[in-house]
Image (cartoon, rainbow, N blue to C red):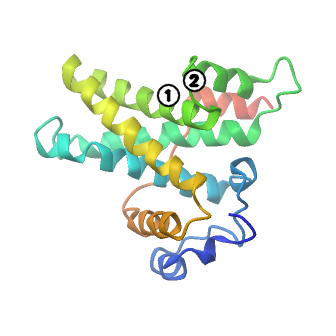
Amino acid sequence: FPNGTVERLPGIARAKRDRALRYGPTMPFDLAERIANEDHATMWAEVIALGARNGVEDLHAAGAFTDDQAPVLNWRLRGHAYEVLIALRSMDSRRDDDPFTAYLIDVIDDRPQDPLRAALGSAIANAMSEFADAEGIDVETAERLTGAAVDGALEVVDLYYRLDQSEAREQLAFLIISIPCYWEPPQLSPSFKAMLEQR
């Protein structure tokens, strides 16, 4: 946040108290610095996943997937967003053989957007694709779900870019407060864990 902290967002003190979260004292505006510790990466992954989940809620209500399937979708969204944030934190683009840079390049897959939007958009799309394949969701429905989820996630990213505006801060604070208490922390895939262990 420009010259500020997470505590400047409306309702954050209450959210931290109610959910017993420890986000750390500061949240710089630059995303690479903003996710400089594990707690921040977890929080942002959950907020991005919540944006994606909100994006597909109308389709969920219309029967695109069931309530029983929803926890699996939520888990996949959190995990994929989390991996991108950890990769951004861990990458060293000065190294030709940096696995995290290679991971991000692979995730971005030539999307015509800025790198953050491209990486998170692709991550959410990959999560939706895995979910649809695993749950036997038809191709047309899967495409609609993917588009809605990516749009919802990128709306959250857009809030990051507008944090100088009070409305954006209020919306982001509301999302943070709205993270379900029953959500488990995001998990890394075995292949991504292996990359971290080999650093």
Q: Is residue 37 visible?
A: no
Instruction: Give the residue at x 77% y 34%.
Output: 91
> What is the CA distance from the residue labelled 2 to the residue labelled 1?
6 Å
Instruction: Give the residue at x 47% y 55%.
Output: 47
The reply, left or right, for residue 197 in relation to residue 47 is right
Instruction: Give the residue at x 17% y 47%.
Output: 67
| Closer to us: 123 or 183 | 123
| Closer to us: 122 or 90 | 122
Q: Hey, which quadrant is residue 70 in on the image?
A: top left
Q: Secondary structure at mark 1?
A: helix
Q: Hey, which quadrant is residue 4 in on the image?
A: bottom right
Determine which residue is flagged by label 1. 122
Give the number of the disc on residue 107: 2
The location of residue 137, given as percent across then percent down, is 20, 24
The location of residue 63, given as percent across then percent down, is 11, 38
Mark 2 and mark 1 residues within 8 Å of each other at the beta carbon:
yes
Circle 2: is it few (<14), some (14-19), or many (20+) Cα within 10 Å?
Answer: some
Q: Residue furthest front?
A: 165
Instruction: Give the residue at x 72% y 64%.
Output: 2
Q: Which quadrant of the rendered structure holds the N terminus?
A: bottom right
* Residue type for callout 1: Ser
Q: Relative to 23, does residue 103 appear above or below in the rendering? A: above
The reply, left or right, for residue 190 in relation to residue 88 is left
